[in-house]
Amino acid sequence: MRLQADTRPLWVSGQELHTSRRVYGWIDDIARKHKLQVSEIGKSTGGRPLKLLTLGNKSGKKAILVISRQHPPEVTGYFAMQSFVATLAADTRLAQRFRKDWTVYVVPLMNPDGVDGGFWRHNVGGVDLNRDWADFNQPETRAVRDFLKQRAADGARFYFGIDFHSTWDDIYYTLDPKFKGNMPGLVPEWLDKIQQAIPHYKPVIQPSERLEPTTVSRNYFLKEHGMEAIVFEIGDNTPRDLITEKGKVGATELMKLILAKSAP
Ligand SMILES: [Zn+2]
């Protein structure tokens, strides 16, 4: 690669550039379109807001959690999250039924300073946020921890937690089914349904045998709140239309399964 440098800054981006401004814009757009609540659960070290989107029944006691962009450049995971959340917010009969009883909390941008600074994995504090879910040394992870604690104290129960990332390939990092949360079996059954719904698709699933120390978000979500939790990794070069499809199918199958498993 040859670059012409002069006195003006030259920005080089390996993937589509989705800075904090653009992500906040997406949050506002989807909130306006579907009349969703946007709030702030804290601020990053650099003073940028950590925004929370709330979908569904605000006084409900059954909840799921969605987070993304702990790692700044992982935009393909972010694209899957956008499609996933748009499907949960849609005016389909399934999504309306789901939102009647369930609350979906979304933190689309966990590391706004890192995103705007073009950092690889860290935040402004020089810490990989997805290694901070045991010590909570950083304001970004603490904000989510405190929010979850507050909701749990208010009587909410979390059943599912998903953290969107990107890597070389599409991979699901799950937890070994021996670790049981509030809806045992949800994650493996869900991944089966996704596989059935996308023709010729064979997902790579890598369960972790270790829960403690919690360190990563997925383990904290299960250990502390009983969420059936997963790290949803999308390949850097996965075709963008397949990413959208996976997000949509993922949300659709999840809603169906949760409704079936929670039926009285
Ligand atoms: Zn990552």
Image (tube, rainbow, N blue to C red):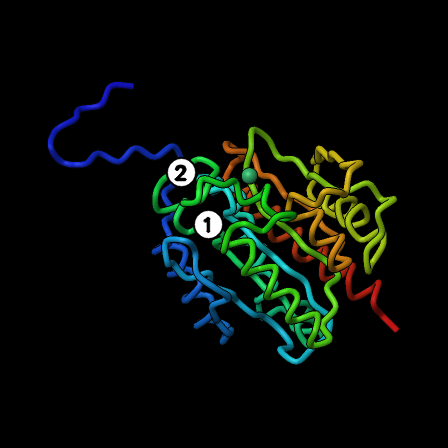
Q: In which quarter of the image is residue 154?
A: bottom right
For marks 1 and 2, the one nearer the N-term is 1
Report the quarter where the C terminus lies: bottom right
Q: Is residue 91 visible?
A: yes
Q: Quadrant of residue 198?
A: top right
Q: Are marks 1 and 2 in contact (CB under 8 Å)?
A: yes
Residue beneath disc 1: 111
For the point 61% across and 53% down, which residue is it?
Answer: 248
Report the quarter where the N terminus lies: top left
- Name the foreground residue: 147 vs 171: 147
Question: Element type at marker 2?
Answer: loop
- Name the foreground residue: 213 vs 252: 213
Given the current orientation, which residue lies at the most extreme left position?
A: 7
Given the current orientation, which residue lies at the most extreme top position?
A: 2
- Name the foreground residue: 14 vs 65: 65
For label 2, count other residues whose C-alpha is less than 10 Å away and answer few (under 14), some (14-19) or many (20+).
some
Residue beneath disc 2: 119
Question: Element type at marker 1?
Answer: loop
Cβ of mark 2 under 8 Å from ligand 1: the answer is no
Horizontal and vertical percent for residue 152?
Answer: 70, 70
